[in-house]
Amino acid sequence: MKLESQREVVLGVDTHLDVHVGVVISEIGQLLGTRSVSASSSGYLELISWASAFGVLTRAGVEGTGTYGAGLCRVLLDNGVTVLEVNRPDRAKRRQQGKSDPTDAESAARAVLSGLATAIPKQQSGACEAMRIISVARRSSVKAKTQAINQLRALLVSAPQDIREKLWRTKTSDCVKACAKIRSLGDSVLLQALTSTLRSLAKRWLTLAAELDQFDKQLEALTRTHAQQLRSRFGVGPHTAAILLSVAGDNPDRLKSEAALASLCGVNPLPASSGKTTRHRLNRGGSRAANNALWTIAMVRMRSDPRTRIYVDRRTTEGLTPKEIHRCLKRYIVRELFPLIVGDLGKLQGCV
């Protein structure tokens, strides 16, 4: 029994909104037990206590460490358990084994035991997480604001000609202010509905504009304080800096190299050679938000940075397409920004 209690066991967890399913396997891959717990603090502690009864729990593979498994991940780390992020099983494997929560949890545990799972979960406890939260809210505000002005202009286009001429403005802010001030366009049912709808959309746009301004001020303050090295580079603004830092996470040790960051951002070149053609193609994986941030930085430099414009002209002469040049630029930008991101993250943790 003493040897039993000292053997290492591995925990695999399939996470959901209300319930987590855990599976424990031994160091030789033997299935030891399956248990479902509630997605709560008491449930997390119950799962750890249950798994520890089979042996020494040192490693755990968890699906969705940034979403449903975030709370469990924090509790496991606080209890000295190494947590590795596990992707869901591929479709070919699921077709062979079937799909169930215990099966997914067992696959997570076996991925850790075999060494396939090596990704360190992103910590969500510092300034990077604050930037991510603000960026998420800002992104939805931008979409809602764009939708509001598009709907307002569409209503004006189809409105009676006299109303259109009265309220239409080329400049967005002027058009919105004119619609926000209207009191009545007429007594008919159509005109009453048009009056209230235009006024409502205009007020919504103004509210969202004020909300965006507040988000921008918060990101500016956060990045100026916590991303000084990153902000010093040409073309890196508060929004792009916040996205890159939030994707990297609050723990710089998870970024082993600039190639890892490139893969995380989806800008690592993928071979696409065939026959006599030797080339690379764009990567459609990784974080699309980070990829878009690098795209924005590259666009700014292509328009305004003399060094980048010389590079674009040279690669165009060599026969590269604009997409290929953009892919190369994003990869070079990651190489340039990686030590700055790690440096800023290190300062956040007091490592530098």
Image (cartoon, grey):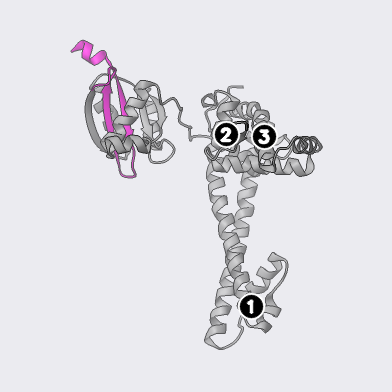
Earlier in the chain: of badge 1 and badge 2, it is 1
Asked whether 323 or 28 is in front, the reply is: 323
Earlier in the chain: of badge 2 and badge 3, it is 2
Earlier in the chain: of badge 3 and badge 1, it is 1
Q: Amino acid at mark 1?
A: Ile
Tell me, yes or no, whether the two marked residues, 3 and 1, touch with CB atoms within 8 Å: no
Which element carries disc 2, helix, strand or loop? loop
Which residue is at 53% across, 37% downward?
A: 286
Q: CA distance from mark 2 to mark 3?
A: 14 Å
- In the picture, residue 238 is in which quadrant? top right
Q: Position of residue 282 (x, y in %)?
A: 59, 38
Q: Amino acid at mark 3?
A: Cys
Instruction: Answer few, some or many: residues within 10 Å of disc 1's Cα (few below 14, many 20 plus, some between 14 and 19).
Output: few
Q: Which residue is mark 3?
A: 328
Tell me, yes or no, whether the two marked residues, 1 and 2, touch with CB atoms within 8 Å: no
Outermost left residue: 1
Q: Which residue is mark 2?
A: 272
Nearest to viewer (mark 2 / mark 3):
2
Which element carries disc 1, helix, strand or loop? loop
Locate residue 321 relative to residue 272 in the image: left or right: right
Nearest to viewer (mark 3 / mark 1):
3
- In the picture, residue 310 is in which quadrant? top right
Q: Position of residue 329 (x, y in %)?
A: 69, 35
Q: Which residues are magenta?
A: 1-30
Q: Position of residue 221 (x, y in %)?
A: 65, 42
In the picture, the disc for residue 182 is: 1
Q: Amino acid at mark 2?
A: Ala
Instruction: Answer few, some or many: residues within 10 Å of disc 3's Cα (few below 14, many 20 plus, some between 14 and 19).
Output: many
